[in-house]
Amino acid sequence: VALSKDLCHLIVMCFGELVEHVIGEKDNVSRNGSLVGLHSLLLDTSIFRK
């Protein structure tokens, strides 16, 4: 977990397998390959800014 300098973004990195029912239809993911790997998620935390 990491915060940006301006505290407006939270970055979460994890290793594991993506669950297929969580992946949206419009997400550009190859279903033929493995979904195991290093994944990152960028969250907009600007709503918590004063």
Image (cartoon, rainbow, N blue to C red):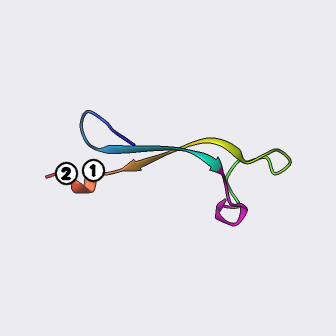
Residue 11: x percent and y percent? 42, 42
> How many numbered discs sit on the rendered protein?
2
Q: Secondary structure at mark 1?
A: helix
Confirm or deny contact between disc 2 and disc 1 (CB under 8 A). Answer: yes
Check residue 22 for magenta coloring.
yes
Quarter of the picture holding the N terminus: top left
Say which residue label 1 marks.
46
- Quarter assignment of residue 18: bottom right
State the image coordinates of residue 14 (x, y, percent, origin top left).
54, 45
Q: Quadrant of residue 26?
A: bottom right
Q: Is residue 4 magenta?
A: no
Q: Please, what is the three-letter code of the amino acid marked with disc 1?
A: Ser
Residue at image coords 66%, 61%: 24
Give the number of the disc on residue 49: 2
| Residue farthest toward the right in the current orientation of the protein | 32
| Whether residue 5 is situated above or below residue 10 in the rendered picture | above
Residue sitting at x 36%, y 45%: 10
